[in-house]
Amino acid sequence: MKEVSLRRAERVDSEFLFALRNDAEVRRLSLNQAPLDSETHRGWFAKKLADHNSAIFIAEIEGAPIGQVRFDVREENPREAEVSIALVAEFRGKGYGNRILKSAAERFFALFPDAATLYAYINLGNEASLRSFQKAGYTLLGESTRGGQTRHEMALARPSVTQTL
C-alpha cells in the first residue's frame, strides 16, 4: 500500500472536489444524491474555505489527490463535529479509507482543541464505509434518520491524554 499524505484543501482543489462530489458512486452514498452544478459548487467551496468551523483535508499519493475528508463543527454544539470522506474510484475498497480517517481525525483534533466527539453518518448497506470507520476507531451508536434517510450513526471520542507524574 502506498504512503498517503494529508493537507488542508486550497482554492486549487475546487475542480478535483467538484469531480469527486459528482462521481456517481459518491452521489449514491451521499445524503444529497443530486448532481451539483459547478457554480453552486464554487460558491459552497469558497464558503467552506472561509468557514472557521470547517476543515477539508485532501488525501494524496505522490502529490496526486485521491480523496477528501471534511469536518464540520456543529453550530449548536461546538464540542461535536460531523465527518465525511470520499475517495476516487481506484482507491476504494483497498484499505486507504480507515488510514485516511485516522490521520484526518488526529489533524482535526489538533486544529480544534475544543472538539470532543466526531460523528459519521453512513448509508445502510454501505458495508465498506462502515468497516473503514470501525477500523479507524469509530463506534457504532445505532441508526438515525436525517434528511429522510435512515443511516448508521458512528462516533469517535477525542483520545484522552494520560499524564504521568
Image (cartoon, helix red, strand yellow):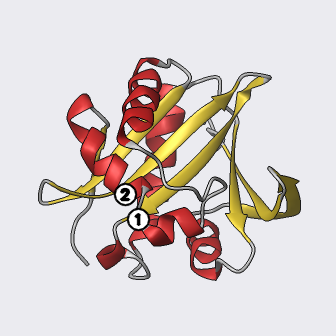
- Residue at 64% from the left image edge and 77% from the top image edge: 126
Q: In this view, does 47 lie above or below 15?
A: above
Q: What residue type is labelled 1?
A: Asp
Residue at the disc numbered 1: 23
Left or right: residue 41 compared with residue 130: left
Give 150 or 57, whichever is nearer the viewer: 150
Badges 1 and 2: C-beta atoms under 8 Å apart?
Answer: yes
Residue placed under numbered mark 2 in the picture: 20
Label 2 crowding class (10 Å Cα cut-off): few <14, some 14-19, many 20+? many
Q: Which residue is drawn at 39% across and 64% down?
A: 87
Q: Quadrant of residue 76?
A: top right
Query: CA gap, disc 1 to disc 2?
Result: 5 Å
In the displayed structure, does residue 119 sit left or right of residue 161? right
Determine whether 105 is above or below 148 in the image: above
The quadrant of the picture occupied by the N terminus is bottom left
Residue 96 placement (x, y as % from top left):
38, 71
Question: Where is residue 17 drawn, in percent x and y?
Answer: 34, 48
Q: What residue do we see at 35% from left, 48% from top? A: 18
